[in-house]
Image: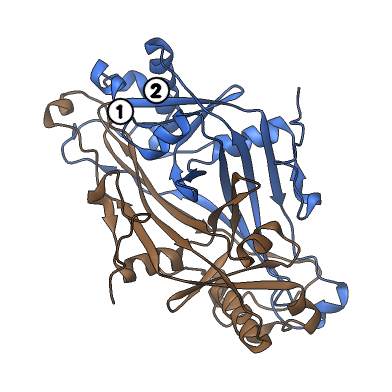
Chain colours: A brown, B blue
Amino acid sequence: MSEFTPTERTRVRRKPDRANYDRETIYGILDQAFVCHVGFIADGMPVVVPTNYVRVGDKLFLHGSTASRLMKTLGSGAPFCLSVTLLDGIVFSPTATGHSVNYRSVVLMGKAEPIRDPAAKLAAMRDFVEYVLRGRWAAVRPPSEQELNGTMVLAVPLVEASAKIRTGFAVDADKEYDGTAWTGVLPFRWTPGEPVRDPRGDQTAPVPENIQHYSRPQ
Amino acid sequence: MSEFTPTERTRVRRKPDRANYDRETIYGILDQAFVCHVGFIADGMPVVVPTNYVRVGDKLFLHGSTASRLMKTLGSGAPFCLSVTLLDGIVFSPTATGHSVNYRSVVLMGKAEPIRDPAAKLAAMRDFVEYVLRGRWAAVRPPSEQELNGTMVLAVPLVEASAKIRTGFAVDADKEYDGTAWTGVLPFRWTPGEPVRDPRGDQTAPVPENIQHYSRPQ
């Protein structure tokens, strides 16, 4: 199935022309973004927490300390909403209210299941490290049994998800363009800077090519 | 008061050494970020929606269409949680589980109040446009009465907020550093690209200096 079926909770209501339910598009946004915001209910109140994730096939993995409230809440099967947003640009319009942003966002609803099998958990940890940097797993010490025990890994089947995408220029009426204000789009992108070497690390280790020229899937 | 008083809901529990309740620090993060994620409860389920905001003094303003569910829910006084996250870097550690990210995040809890007074609403709209770009308000057509009527502006008093900040290198034990993996931090930053002119706009208008060299408060 190449499309998510919009549900009552994932159907884009506001500006439905920006809606996208295509699995490949949604996965592309998830793979490029790096931080998500997870919303859940704690003591009857909404809570939003930023965290990392990795998508593998039709699943998303979350991980964290077994002591974290986010992990404990989600691990207990509580419903949650997870959102990622890539800010692609600022849209300068000839009118005040015409200003906008170009973005790609994904919202997904889910229930998580803790991964208890040690081998599956280790595999997910590997996915996390490889999501940060392809090839990194082989270069570092793998998790100890104690580290694995202290980490909760949650699997989220990707069932209910939608994307919302805005591209292009302002959509004001032609008559608004009779002014002299500069109009257009200022694109934005998360850009890596110069790698900074850890003073405790091997000072002769060359900066790996994929760190020096880091990129995420576009 | 230069510090927020941590409450039951804003006290940082996980990694409290990363907690920061300083008003200036929190405002700095809010002013630099551009997109927030708002969590609220709809039909008993958690929902997270990305949106824009502007901070003015000890208040945050949100705005949107009067038809949007986010605006309607928050405008009715429903409790919400708002989070912004700036991803500052990826931390490469000698161990799999030591990998981390450097970030600055803010979480705030609030209740919003709709601004009904037209003059106050117009002033907030001006704040929004000026938050995007200083000096922009004077260059564009101000909102019409109809546009103002179709926009809901919510004021959120900044009362309950906390920041969480991670900086620096990996925190693994010294003995982990006997390997040959490159370790360090790859810094990240939202970076503006080359402005793209709107084909419908004045083609002779020079790109304003503060768009050509766009920066947000650091």
Residue B125: numbered disc:
2
Estimate the x, y position of residue B46 in percent, counting from the top left.
51, 50
Q: Is residue B125 visible?
A: yes
Label 1 sits on a secondary structure element that is: loop
Number of dots carrying numbers: 2
The quadrant in which residue A197 appears is bottom right
Estimate the x, y position of residue A150 in percent, counting from the top left.
77, 73
Is residue A169 positioned above or below A66 on the image?
A: above
Do dots 2 and 1 share one subunit?
A: no
Estimate the x, y position of residue A195 in percent, counting from the top left.
63, 64
A212 sits left or right of B164 in the view: left
- Amino acid type, callout 1: Thr
- Amino acid type, callout 2: Met
A125 sits left or right of A186 in the view: right
Label 2 sits on a secondary structure element that is: helix
Name the subunit of mark 1. Answer: A
What's the CA distance linking mark 2 and mark 1? 8 Å
Query: Dot 1: few (<14), some (14–19), or many (≥20) neighbours within 10 Å?
Result: many
The quadrant in which residue B133 appears is top left
Estimate the x, y position of residue B172 in percent, counting from the top left.
81, 70
A48 sits left or right of A202 in the view: left
Q: Are marks 2 and 1 in contact (CB under 8 Å)?
A: yes
Is residue B25 positioned above or below A71 on the image?
A: above
Q: Is residue A208 visible?
A: no
Residue A97: numbered disc:
1
Is residue A156 positioned above or below A100 on the image?
A: below
Viewer-nearest residue: A84 or B187: A84
In the image as oriented, which residue stretches furthest toward the front? B44
B196 sits left or right of B61 in the view: left
